[in-house]
Amino acid sequence: FNVSRVETTPFGDQKPGTSGLRKKVKVFKQPNYLQNFVQSTFNALTPQNVRGATLVVSGDGRYFSKDAIQIITKMAAGNGLRRVWVGQNGLLSTPAVSAVIRERVGIDGSKATGAFILTASHNPGGPNEDFGIKYNMENGGPAPEGITDKIYENTKTIKEYLTADLPDVDITTIGVTSFSGSEGQFDVEVFDSASDYIKLMKSIFDFESIRKLLSSPKFTFCYDALHGVAGAYAKRIFVEELGAQESSLLNCVPKEDFGGGHPDPNLTYAKELVARMGLGKSNSEVEPPEFGAAADGDADRNMVLGKRFFVTPSDSVAIIAANAVEAIPYFSAGLKGVARSMPTSAALDVVAKSLNLKFFEVPTGWKFFGNLMDAGLCSVCGEESFGTGSDHIREKDGIWAVLAWLSILAYKNRENLGGGKLVTVEDIVRNHWATYGRHYYTRYDYENVDAGAAKELMACLVKLQSSLTEVNEIVSGIQSDVSKVVHADEFEYKDPVDGSISKHQGIRYLFEDGSRLVFRLSGTGSEGATIRLYIEQYEKDPSKTGRDSQDALAPLVAVALGLSKMQEFTGRSAPTVIT
Ligand code: VG1
Ligand code: CO
């Protein structure tokens, strides 16, 4: 093959967000748009991670992925990479990409040094919806800010990109296709999307004990992939490996447009699962399953449900951390530490304190957990946004979280499967609250609001922080029975490993009784701005941990909306999504 240099001009809007570059497909389809970003990334890497290197390219299979894989493959050859690895049909979940970078060894002993993950995660897909791309590093984790900043700088000055005149490669069939160029050979290896990941899961969990649980007639199960890439793993793992019934899988065929839905595992978008679990409005006569779970488009998120019961993600990570050593073989030697993102509730903090574990609070986005894990400081971590994971890889992991919950259920029921009453998801959560107290928690999202208005709202909240007296006057004017604000700031993080500092990571109002209000602007949207409001209240008294969370939080919600003048700034009387 021959390599050519193609002239190009910069686009001004290629700044990577919380998790890569996400835009409407139409934006990505502009001539040279994807090419500019890919070349800017190659130019931001060290030469040994480009020339002669092995690159993984795959994603959640959303619309435009197949075209993108061909474009990136040709550019990889043009930039002197030695080989590209592609999951069959271009499918690899985000956690599977991380696992492949870390664990997979090619036929000739090669190892990957990075990946382009093609996904916009939980955003809808299709010709009129979103596409996305992000780069992951040698450790399997998202590129840190130092690299994403460099990529962005490069996109502002790019003049040319390199590409090779290869034919399109068949990505539907497993095998290697080789090409020879003037500088040597270039291979494209298409491999099974699930086998490396399954091997890793088997080394972490006791599949035999989960199999006993899943094949017991007492335990019923349901998994909804929302037509995302998790479907490519769910059948192999839950049905073939663990003995669940095929009828327990919902929407497990990956689709380019996610069946027209919003592949976001929460109570609003995972409608079918929510109804099946007896949480919907139309409560049918059919007895719901004991356990239900859903994933997002790229399968790094999870929602865990019990029968007629919702587990908040903040509780989920705390419960996994509290039970990991007993229930999951990978952690049997103990946890190195735990971490959560700032807006995530403090349920994990209480577990860490009680078990005397190292604890870290990082900004939103998985990239901040990676350094802690690489330094051996953190085993289990999570975010309120339905993300949970561990140091087995450097991404959050939706199927891992489900296997973790199944492991806990299998452990708690190890003597009950023959006879005796099943310990349910709800029992586990209520017992956890009884031991550690409960963090009532909710998140309000105001999607696609005017970007200028959102900025003004945030600026006002920052300005307000200069006088706590004034803040408390406003607060008590809105609601006399909430506690006092004792601290307010913009969250700033100093990475304990490399010392790097991340500023402006969300506005916090901290109350005397441990309640918190947090305001952030989303960094993953593709249109307008999304304001996220996180509301949390701690209740230690076991007689008061059983309330409905929206009722319990109503006074704080009123304070948050009043303090921020939400309706005045955004014109919205209600959020788009409540989780
Ligand atoms: C959101 C979540 C954040 C998560 C990120 C990526 O970011 O709040 O917790 O890490 O999405 O998730 P933001 O900036 O929109 O709040 V996903 O599933 O892309 O992989
Ligand atoms: Co995701």
Image (cartoon, rainbow, N blue to C red):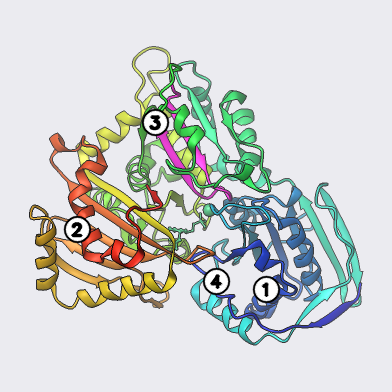
4 or 3: mark nearer the eye: 3
Residue 204 seen anywhere in this rendered image of the structure: no
Q: Which residues, given as a range, are shown in magenta?
A: 288-305
Measured from the top left, where is residue 484 in percent x and y? 10, 61
| Residue found at x 74% / y 83% | 8
Three-letter residue code for mark 4? Pro
The image quarter containing residue 80 is bottom right
Which of the two discs, 3 and 1, labels the residue nearer the N terminus?
Answer: 1
What label sits on residue 49 in the rendered view? 1
- Local packing at callout 3 (Cα closer than 10 Å; few below 14, some 14-19, many 20+) is some
- Distance Cα–Cα, label 3 vs label 1: 49 Å
Three-letter residue code for mark 2? Val
- The residue to which callout 2 is attached is 559
Element marked by disc 2: helix
- The residue to which callout 4 is attached is 16
Three-letter residue code for mark 1? Asn
Which quadrant does the N terminus fall into? bottom right
Element marked by disc 1: helix
The image quarter containing residue 364 is bottom left
